Image (cartoon, rainbow, N blue to C red):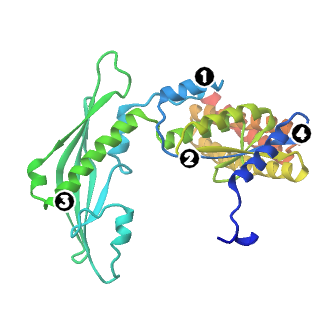
Amino acid sequence: MSTPPPETQQPDRKTGDAVFDAYAEAMDGEGAPLLGHLVLYSIFDGKVTRDDLVGWFTELDLDEALLPPPVRPVDAFERVTGPDGVRVTYPLDDPTATGPASKRGQRRSRTQLVKTATLMVRPVRRDGGQIVRHVVREVRDEEQTSLKYDTRLATCTFERDNSENSPEGAGTLTIEENRSAIARLPEAEQTTVRQMLTDVNASFRHRCTYLTSDKLRSVVRRYVEYLSAIRVRPTGGVYFVHRQHAQTLGALRELVGRFGQGSHLVRVPLPDQDEMREMIIIAFTTKAKDELDALAKDIAAAQRNGKAEDARKLYERFTTLQAATNEHSELLSTSLDDTRASLQLVKIQLGGLLATATEDE
């Protein structure tokens, strides 16, 4: 077999990783002109329990105050049976054709109208002892532009555990089939309905045991922001963290690598150069301006309402932003004059609100 020409050869990923690791190690070395790191991460579902996370935080010397709260079965139930929970849609002429892959294989012409069914969970009632939800079958007839419902194919009930020593949110899931209603469906649909109920139960058990990717992502984001990170991209996902937190970032990288399933955190060293420094300063001042504009609007609204508790919360937001400005001004060796000027204007506005709230008290 002939060797492809150089321009068509695929780059050696391992070689690229080795080069990057060598660069990162050199930049992290003592005396290197390092400003800080750009931090990016991707986190996927795996099988990580909260106990796993507690052990890893201890081992990696991470701040355990930033651990997520224990998993609550009631939250798992709400998620699995909620609007974004388990739901199945299929064409009535082929009830086994569920999911994206089958839909791609079920392409029809624009003029061909079909009947589809959707199995979903709908709330019925909740009280201090139970949360009750029904599995509903919705049939959509495109030709007749109508909907038809079977309102209870099964009942999903969360039984709260209100015993004295039970943790908050404890409880169990029970799923009761409405056998007569299911039996009236074609056999293929009966199979699909029972598989959906199995999926609800399995998803609930999984969420009661393992932290979801959303929860793990929240843990990492909270920890990165705890390191006084500056959001470089307005929508999030890319942060700048000053070099003083390099060791903690290394521990976070090791932590995320243990999540499995392709999860990873990347630290891109930024050299201490004018262009890099300017990029970070612009990112901070842009974010600070947005926060100050929002704070000014909220202060104006609070002045109209005259609530003392609003004034206290707004003052906390102001002091947090002021502390961040002082910290980053020192770390980045810049005055951040525009942000300080805006802070001063908001401070004057806030002083008027606080004075009014004090008089009202």
* SS category of the residue bearing label 3: helix
> Which residue corresponds to mark 4?
32
Q: Which mark is residue 23?
A: none
Q: Image point 64% across, 26% down: which residue?
A: 60
Q: Which mark is residue 262?
A: 2
Q: Quadrant of residue 256?
A: top right
Mark 2 packing: few (<14 Cα in 10 Å), some, or many (20+)?
few
Give amino acid for label 1: Thr
Give amino acid for label 4: Ala
How far apart marks 3 and 2 lie (CA) works out to: 36 Å
Along the line of sight, the residue nearer the viewer: 270 or 11: 11
How far apart marks 3 and 1 lie (CA) works out to: 50 Å
Q: Is residue 112 visible?
A: yes
Q: Residue furthest top?
A: 164
Give amino acid for label 3: Glu
- Asked whether, in this view, residue 182 is left or right of residue 18, the answer is left
- Asked whether, in this view, residue 274 is left or right of residue 129, the answer is right
Q: Where is residue 248? Give x, y as percent.
A: 71, 31
Quarter of the picture containing the N terminus is bottom right
* SS category of the residue bearing label 1: helix
Mark 3 packing: few (<14 Cα in 10 Å), some, or many (20+)?
many
> Which residue corresponds to mark 1?
58
Q: Is residue 361 visible?
A: no
Q: Closer to the N terminus: mark 3 or mark 1? A: 1
Mark 1 packing: few (<14 Cα in 10 Å), some, or many (20+)?
few
Q: Closer to the N terminus: mark 3 or mark 4? A: 4
Give amino acid for label 2: Gly
Query: Looking at the image, is mark 1 or mark 2 nearer the viewer?
Result: 2
- Asked whether, in this view, residue 45 is left or right of residue 317, the answer is left
Q: Closer to the N terminus: mark 3 or mark 2? A: 3
> Which residue corresponds to mark 3?
189
Q: Label 1 near label 4: C-beta < 8 Å?
A: no
